[in-house]
Image (cartoon, rainbow, N blue to C red):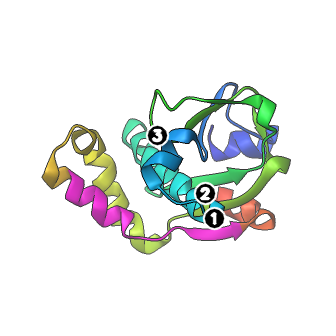
Amino acid sequence: MGAVGVRDTGVLGSAPVTAFAVTPALREWYVDDDIEELEYAAMLEAARASLRLLDADPGAARRRVVVAAEVPDPLVTVRDDLERGVVRVAEPVAKTQVASVHMDDDDAEAAVAAAAEVIVPADLGDSSAQQVVDDAEGFELSWYATQEIGPLLELL
């Protein structure tokens, strides 16, 4: 859902919403019991997935965006069969459930644009494409509080 849709409806996406979380497969892959580290790993998986969304939408701003939200457990179904850390949320995520937003800064745009163009070959094992993706993943996502969401939507 684009920025205007979020502003107008107050929800992110339509049900079911594909998202990332700390799942059994993520725990097994990351091998760390620290919940903050596991949540960070889930965020990195979501940031990588956002490259696939950028590849599919050439008109979108060339920035990875990850929205962290608090969703009741009964609404979440683990889908590690799709990819490590993937979950499906049964209902749209309300803007009021958002805890924070993480987004690339301006200086990452060129690297993110290049990575979005080669994410599929990287996923399929192309090592030179993977290097381009690694370059983009070297940029840390900036953290934004919920009250900063409105101005962020204007950037997208």
Q: Residues within 10 Å of mark 2 (few under 14, many from 20)?
A: some
Find numbered disc 1 in the image and state the secondary structure of the residue it sits on. helix
**Circle nearer the N terminus (3, 1):** 1
Relative vertical location of residue 4 with respect to residue 87 in this rendering, above or below:
below
- Residue 67 position in % (x across, y down): 65, 52
| Residue at image mark 2 | 39
**In 3D space, how far apart are the residues under numbered discs 3 and 2 (Cα atoms)?**
13 Å
N-terminal-most mark, 3 or 2: 2
Q: Are marks 2 and 1 in contact (CB under 8 Å)?
A: yes
Q: Quadrant of residue 145?
A: bottom right
Specify start and end residues of the magenta stretch as a single range.
Answer: 130-144
Where residue 79 appears, x then y in whole percent? Answer: 55, 29
Residue 84: numbered disc:
3
Task: State how many labels appear.
Answer: 3
Which of 128/81 is in front? 81
Identify residue type, mark 3.
Answer: Arg
The answer for how far apart the CA atoms under marks 2 and 1 are is: 5 Å
Examine the rendering and report whether any part of residue 87 can be seen: yes
